[in-house]
């Protein structure tokens, strides 16, 4: 057995920090790698050493095998942990580590290669008695062949990138007329994300659940499962909420699914951490193999919370040569296990040690759920997680972190444990409501709405939950307290700067009957707040057809405190400059524990030069890379036709024509980067 002394973490963000935490606890030195965009990132600060590996696009840095191997040699790292995403399931990368005598903290390159092809993986599972989803996994990838096979399978059909995961290169097709365009999009996305555009086709189940089994194997052939995680709440095939145990698995189905996962692990001589994913029927009685994720999962903390185990530590110890019975302190004789056979982890042990019986995780993303979930960029003005028992935060951000276009919009994972499901959900809602993340728009309110939904609380959901449930998280009419908090913050900031006539109350005017006004934009709606200063920090405030008696108390460190109709309110308020054309306005980010958080724009009381908006102009709704232009000047297009495709934060976003017209001029080219609000195309 070889003790690992120094680990290079070939990743970024929260997973890099997560791995470094365990390494530090084990007395192992760490090395970070970073791109241009990440030079000031938190994972770079947390590492003992850091090596610059290239430009911001992942292909130039985190996906460049040679640069990462070179960084390991340069720093004398004897092991590499790949995290998840990037090169974590790249067989060529694992093989290079093996060739260079660098310990790869993960499975063998052979196991990764076998499971890296979804088509090949399904064939292996069929031969080993693991139930698989009906579909097509053939080598022929012509458009004609894929269309023919899809028709044979029957609609709806699911297109999946053979080499990938995480929802990339995946499309649901419900009608034959949509098939050709969907295949082209899925192939392009698969090529961009994984360097391989091969697809497999599967029968798509409209009403099902997504359940996965955490497995571990060692180099002696022992395999063990650590029970399930329910990952059914998804959007765009990206998991949003994960929990354990599943609210619907019976002991019998759990045992059968776990046994199938162990068969899958043994079939490929699997060692280290992995996850076997299954589709579970709506009746929760039948299941089908989906894939093996040959890496640590994003949602691994859910299993850690309910077992009390450190999965990264287990990964490292298995990579060093330890066996599962040694790592998990299992008495092989007592558990009737043999070398090379499945090992049962005793879950009663966790009860004795008071681990959480239930756990769930939510993913906090930089995205605007009120605007078609568009990814958001910007600077984190305040990150302040709330501390409470049984709640854990895995994040790669801090106050001052810049969120850019090059990487996944995941900001943080929040994990809560409870003695039962109700307690865990309640803790999670509390943590979300009281944690402050201001500076970019997040999906926090959306997550709270899901957690408070009666069907979710009752465990009654499937993979279409977010599409079929009208989650009430978009504010048509904001809470007036947001506007009042913004007004008081701005008023106090002006008062601090005022040097003339300090003995006169602010807002004094000749026309006593005319109230002062402040105007705000929330989305595309304008709201007016009227106020009268009564002196001694007292105000009468009117907004949203309501009138309030307000007394300003204090404003320190962006924390505004005031009395509202006899109730003390505390709000966190941060501002940033945002531009629209030639005018400059304040973006205001406000957090209220009882009401959530909101982004407003303060409209100046003075005339501003407006940017000219011309009918037929198409501007980028987000920063990103133009990866496809579907039209040329002179083309006639109909409303709803695709014009351009922008890749931002690893997700494709198609710009559609919002009216009939003729393409007059195109101002961008493929592979070019655009900023938000940039003019891309003009129609007449």
Image (tube, rainbow, N blue to C red):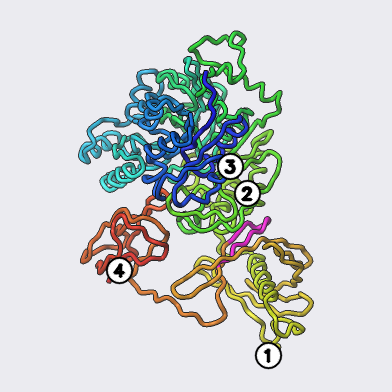
- Depicted 612 relative to depicted 209: above or below: below
SS for dot 3: strand
- 350 or 541: nearer the eye? 350
Comes first in the chain, label 4 or label 2: 2
Whether label 4 touches label 3, CB < 8 Å:
no
- Can you identify the residue that label 1 sits on? 511
Q: Earlier in the sequence, mark 1 or mark 4?
A: 1
Q: Which residues are magenta?
A: 587-598
**Residue 283 in view:** no
Badge 1 or badge 3: first in the primary sequence: 3
Where on the picture, by quarter, is residue 477? bottom right
Local secondary structure at mark 2: helix
Quadrant in which residue 129 is drawn: top left
Secondary structure under tag 4 reads: strand
Lower position in the chain sequence, tag 2 or tag 1: 2
In front of the other: label 1 or label 3?
3
Q: Which residue is mark 3?
A: 394
| Mark 4, residue position | 682
Give the number of the disc on residue 432. 2
């Amino acid at each position: 057995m070889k003790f690992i002394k120094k680990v290079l973490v070939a990743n970024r963000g929260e997973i890099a920090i997560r791995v470094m935490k365990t390494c530090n606890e084990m007395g192992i030195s760490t090395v970070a790698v970073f791109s241009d965009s990440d030079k000031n990132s938190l994972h770079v600060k947390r590492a003992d050493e850091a090596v610059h590996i290239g430009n911001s696009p992942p292909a130039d840095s985190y996906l460049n095998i040679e640069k990462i191997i070179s960084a390991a040699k340069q720093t004398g790292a004897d092991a590499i942990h790949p995290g998840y995403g990037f090169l974590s399931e790249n067989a060529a990368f694992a093989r290079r580590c093996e060739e260079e005598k660098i310990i790869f903290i993960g499975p063998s390159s052979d196991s990764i290669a076998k499971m890296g092809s979804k088509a090949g993986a399904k064939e292996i599972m069929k031969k080993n008695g693991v139930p698989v989803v009906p579909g097509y996994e053939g080598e022929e990838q012509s458009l004609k062949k894929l269309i023919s096979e899809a028709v044979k399978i029957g609609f709806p059909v699911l297109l999946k990138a053979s080499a990938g995961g995480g929802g990339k290169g995946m499309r649901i097709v419900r009608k034959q007329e949509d098939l050709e365009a969907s295949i082209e999009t899925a192939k392009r996305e698969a090529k961009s994300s994984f360097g391989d555009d091969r697809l497999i086709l599967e029968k798509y189940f409209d009403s099902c659940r997504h359940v996965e089994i955490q497995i571990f194997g060692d180099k002696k052939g022992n395999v063990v499962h650590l029970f399930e995680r329910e990952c059914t709440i998804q959007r765009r095939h990206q998991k949003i909420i994960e929990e354990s145990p599943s609210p619907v698995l019976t002991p019998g189905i759990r045992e059968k699914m776990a046994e199938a996962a162990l068969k899958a692990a043994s079939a490929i001589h699997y060692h280290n951490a992995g996850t076997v994913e299954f589709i579970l029927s709506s009746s929760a009685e039948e299941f089908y193999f989906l894939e093996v994720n040959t890496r640590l999962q994003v949602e691994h903390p859910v299993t850690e919370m309910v077992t009390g185990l450190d999965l990264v530590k287990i990964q490292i110890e298995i990579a060093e040569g330890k066996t599962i019975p040694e790592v998990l302190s299992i008495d092989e004789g007592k558990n009737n296990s043999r070398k090379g056979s499945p090992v049962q982890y005793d879950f009663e042990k966790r009860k004795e040690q008071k681990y959480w019986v239930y756990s769930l995780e939510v993913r906090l993303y930089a995205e605007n759920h009120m605007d078609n979930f568009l990814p958001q960029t910007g600077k984190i003005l305040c990150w302040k997680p709330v501390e409470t028992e049984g709640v854990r935060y895995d994040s790669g951000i801090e106050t001052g972190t810049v969120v850019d276009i090059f990487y996944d919009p995941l900001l943080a994972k929040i994990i809560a444990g409870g003695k039962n499901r109700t307690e865990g959900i309640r803790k999670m809602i509390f943590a979300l409501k009281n944690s402050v993340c201001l500076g970019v728009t997040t999906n926090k309110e959306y997550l709270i709405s899901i957690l408070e939904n009666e069907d979710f609380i009752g465990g009654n959901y499937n993979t279409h939950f977010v599409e079929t449930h009208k989650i009430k998280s978009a504010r048509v009419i904001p809470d007036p307290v947001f506007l009042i908090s913004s007004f008081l913050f701005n008023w106090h900031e002006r008062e601090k700067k005022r040097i003339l006539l300090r003995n006169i109350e602010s807002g004094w005017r000749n026309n006593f009957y005319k109230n002062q006004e402040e105007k705000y934009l929330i989305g595309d709606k304008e709201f007016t707040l009227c106020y009268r200063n009564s002196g001694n920090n007292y105000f009468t405030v009117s907004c949203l057809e309501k009138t309030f008696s307000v007394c300003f108390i204090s404003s320190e460190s962006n924390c505004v405190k005031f009395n509202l109709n006899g109730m003390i309110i505390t709000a966190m308020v941060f501002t940033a400059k945002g531009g629209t054309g030639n005018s400059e306005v304040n973006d205001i980010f406000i957090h209220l524990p009882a009401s959530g958080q909101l982004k407003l724009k303060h409209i100046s009381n003075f005339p501003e030069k407006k940017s000219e908006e011309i009918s037929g102009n198409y501007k980028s709704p987000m920063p990103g890379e133009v990866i496809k232009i579907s039209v040329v000047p002179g083309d006639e297009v109909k409303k709803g036709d695709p014009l351009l495709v922008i890749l931002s934060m690893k997700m494709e976003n198609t710009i559609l024509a919002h009216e009939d017209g003729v393409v007059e001029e195109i101002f961008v080219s493929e592979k070019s980067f655009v900023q938000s609000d940039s003019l891309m195309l003009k129609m007449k």
